[in-house]
Image (tube, coloured by chain):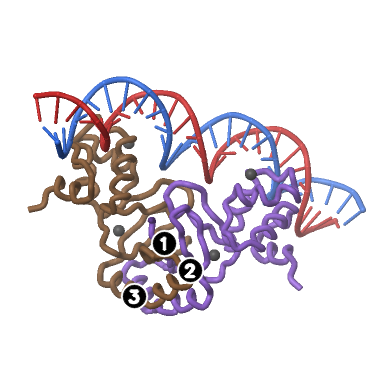
Chain colours: A brown, B purple, C red, D blue
DNA sequence: TGGAGATTTGGAATGATTCTAAGCCTTGGC
DNA sequence: GCCAAGGCTTAGAATCATTCCAAATCTCCA
């Protein structure tokens, strides 16, 4: 059985009460919450957990690759966060929410993208591509 | 010959000196500038053009579909803007800049994505997909 | 168990964007 | 060409998300 402690340690992160609380809270939701939303959701468990810690922790998790940060798709407004680091496609709504595309469809989308193109681009630009991000943007009206 | 005035009119926008200046400035660059950067670039032409007008104008252009808004890929930091509304793939760097993927490669990427999948997703979710956004994210280190 | 160094915290600071309300300008009709 | 009506522009204030700060606390390894 792998505990959160194990996961944190493997990612070079210290294990703190706050980090366990936040990771657990992010892990159980499919809603891609904002820092504020997450802060609100853990308030009952740990009333003293500060918003600054939510930001610090989400930064640390993101840097460690434990979670993914999803910048606002609107241009203004808060980032959202996803504990599911498995490659998947997101559906973005005009009000800023983010939904997962069902796994079977997500997979079919991503399978269409050949690695050869990425390789050719890396050759041409000299840059290393870390990830191909696909978003389906829903119509405004 | 289609003037900027014509373009604005077709998009339901009034033609003002400020809008012409800003559209021209955005049209000639490939750098996906921020509102601030654009403001700086037009300072010599029109010293009185305010930053609020830059924001208002970019909002209006975006709403009209004349340009595209590119939210910060980092999560914090300013939006970038693109006068090229032709569907193309972007390469995003760890410092927040955005580059165009060469057109031939861009096209090959987008051609791989079948409309059938989009259609199936629309059927399943009941939402209309306006656009498929593909970003190639360069490795952080 | 001790302590070096990482983490947490409330509050202040920053940065990007939006709001406000007072003129100004564009447009369409005469 | 002249006149509204209403859209546009503007400086500055306000808002919102995020980052910074510095002091107190906690974690983990020796
Ligand atoms: Mn909160
Ligand atoms: Mn400026
Ligand atoms: Zn997701
Ligand atoms: Zn572009």
Nearer the viewer's eye, disc 2 or disc 3? 2
Distance CA(mark 1)–CA(mark 3): 30 Å
Q: CA distance from mark 1 to mark 2?
A: 10 Å
Q: Which residue corresponds to the image point at 26% horizontal and 62% vertical from the top-left?
A: A86
Residue A1, image x and y in percent? 7, 53
Alpha-carbon distance for marks 2 and 3? 35 Å
**Up-down relation of residue C14 to residue B83 (above or below):** above
Where B8 falls versus A57 (above or below)? below
Question: Which numbered disc flags the more N-terminal residue, 1 or 3?
Answer: 3
x and y, in percent, of residue B35 in the image: 59, 50
Chain name for mark 3: B
**Quarter assignment of residue C2:** top left
| Mark 1, other Cα within 10 Å: few <14 / some 14–19 / many ≥20 | some
Q: Secondary structure at mark 2?
A: helix
Q: Which residue is mark 3?
A: B120
Residue sitting nearer the eye, C3 or A122:
C3
Residue B61 horizontal/vertical position (percent): 61, 58
Residue at the disc numbered 2: A125
Mark 2 crowdedness (10 Å alpha carbons): few <14, some 14-19, many ≥20:
few
Question: Disc 1 vs disc 3: which is toward the camera?
Answer: 1
* Depicted B114 relative to depicted B49: above or below: below
Q: Is residue B60 above or below residue B109?
A: above
Q: Nearer the viewer, residue A45 or C2?
A: C2
The residue labelled by disc 1 is B138
Q: Secondary structure at mark 1?
A: strand
Q: Residue at x 47, y 52 (%)?
A: B95
């Amino acid at each position: 059985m792998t505990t959160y402690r194990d996961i944190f340690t493997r990612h070079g992160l210290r294990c703190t009460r706050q980090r366990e609380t936040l990771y657990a809270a992010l892990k159980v939701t499919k809603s891609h919450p904002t820092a504020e939303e997450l802060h609100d959701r853990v308030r009952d468990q740990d009333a003293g957990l500060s918003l600054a810690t939510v930001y610090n922790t989400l930064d640390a998790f993101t840097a460690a690759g434990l979670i993914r940060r999803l910048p606002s798709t609107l241009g203004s407004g808060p980032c959202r966060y996803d504990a599911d680091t498995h490659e998947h496609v997101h559906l973005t709504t005009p009000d800023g929410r983010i939904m997962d595309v069902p796994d079977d469809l997500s997979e079919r989308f991503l399978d269409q993208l050949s690695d050869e193109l990425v390789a050719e681009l890396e050759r041409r630009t000299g840059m290393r591509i870390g990830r191909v991000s696909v978003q389906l943007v829903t119509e405004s009206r």
